[in-house]
Amino acid sequence: MISCSRFTHEYTKSFFKFVEPLSKDFTVYIHGEEIPVYTCRISAYPLNRVWTGFQRPVNQSETASFVNLVSDEPVTLTIVAHRPHEKILLKPYSKGIVPVEEDGKITFTLPAEGQFVLETDSYHHCLYIFNSRPIPCPDPASVTHYFGPGIHMPGKITLHSGDSVYVDKDALVYGCLFAEDAEDIHIFGNGVFDDSGEERFFIHCYEAYTNGNLKFYDCRNLRIEGILCRNSAIWCLNLFHCFDVDVDGIKIFGQWRYNTDGVDIVNCQDIVIRNSFIHSFDDAVTIKGIDRYAHTNNENILTENCVLWCDWGKTCEVGIETACREYKNITFRNCDLLRAGNTALDIANGDCAEISDITFEDIRVEVDACNTCSKYQSTDDTVYDLQDTIEIPALIRFSNPRFRSRRNFEVWGVPEELLADIDLTGIRQGMIRDVVCRNLKVYYGEGVPLTGDGKYNAAILIHSILEGVRFANILVENVEVNGIRITEDTAVMDVRNTDGFVFR
């Protein structure tokens, strides 16, 4: 069975029909039949700033395209790209699917489900290709919120214990989901949630003033599978003090507004993010701790078999807010990083947790010449002028910069009497120990400098900056750059204030 999303709007109140825009950049055929190609917005370049009271201007974004396929068999695609180009890139490269272009038509076969990005010369105006297993709804009458084929505009939906939400593959829902103090919630389907209707008006990401695509506080036993999340107003998937959460096969894409992190896991336990596609403007997957929930550790958290793309910041991140006693048993495994911001694998212990038992393994990082350098927007008049640069992200960056800086608190409006570090634990602030980074493969595309000063450009930066705090027992094993295993002599490495560091 092969099908695709087709979004149509039934209207009754006037003759003004709502039509979901179609792409002008690509025409796509499945086994010879043309299918709809829809649009979204992504960041045009990595320019970012602290929230100043208004949303990021739309002229810092650009259009991208997407098709949403549902299949349980191989799919052969034929694509016509309408922008002039010299080369075709189908990502992630690790899937080994090589498109063939002949007579203006790009052809390839997807042997199984998976999430891909087709680029013509660069990531600009790319095509997302989502190919997912069918997720049926056995009984619509048994679902609390059922969204069948069509375009729906419910706005914010508040869920309660035992609720379920189903989104048909032909359903485009302009709205967002919220729950607090709830359990046993199931969100599933192959359709789209779009948060375009929500406007952010406040700086804080922790509060419920702005929702984002999905936001949960103090919830337990959540299952989220298959759905697509587009154009969030803030962090996309928010988990605050949640337990027993299984996220499988979701797609986060079309994100360009300020602070659109992909997945934020805040003082949570027993969380799994798997088989998902996450393209965020800001950090992709990040694990945080905040004061409200500082009594609860972050532990037993797994991100695996995911395709990640970070425009700005960190891709697989632990921190920088780390207000709790411990972070432990946290794993990022078997993930493709299509673009890694400024850092691929990051631990930033900015508060008072002790961080231990962290694993990064079987991670593949892609770096292309179109990945230009990040820039901070210091004023309204700042322009992005780094189009001719190449950002080579750090492969590993572990440190303990202070999150509770006076500058941060002044920006956020925190009262003067609270401008001080806290110690919730009695454990030394800023500690990182017992970390394994294993089987890391970096691919540098054409035009990206492979080496500098005779060393491979895959920086490993491990440095405690706090007096009296020395990191301990960090293993980095089997790092390859374009198929070449790097050694201590050929690695860009800065390791300081660390005991028991091993590189092999």
Image: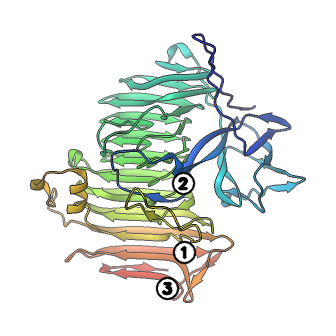
- Residue 493 pos. (x, y %): 45, 81
Q: Residue furthest right?
A: 103
Is disc 3 placed on a helix, strand or loop? loop
Is disc 2 placed on a helix, strand or loop? strand
> Does 303 sit above or below residue 165?
below
- Residue 399 pos. (x, y %): 33, 70
> Of the residues tagged 1 and 2, which is closer to the observer?
2
> Would residue 115 be found to the left or right of residue 232 on screen?
right
The residue that appears at 20% across and 77% down in the rendered structure is 467
The tag on residue 308 is 2
Is disc 1 placed on a helix, strand or loop? strand
Chain-order first, disc 2 or disc 3: 2
Residue position for label 1: 478
> Would residue 328 be found to the left or right of residue 25 on screen?
left
Mark 1: give few (<14), some (14-19) or many (20+) Cα within 10 Å: some
Q: From mark 3 to mark 1, how far is it between C-alphas?
A: 11 Å
Residue position for label 3: 488
Chain-order first, disc 3 or disc 1: 1
The residue that appears at 30% across and 63% down in the rendered structure is 349
Placement of the N terminus among the 4 image quadrants? top right
Which amino acid type corresponds to the residue marked 1 in the rendered image?
Asn
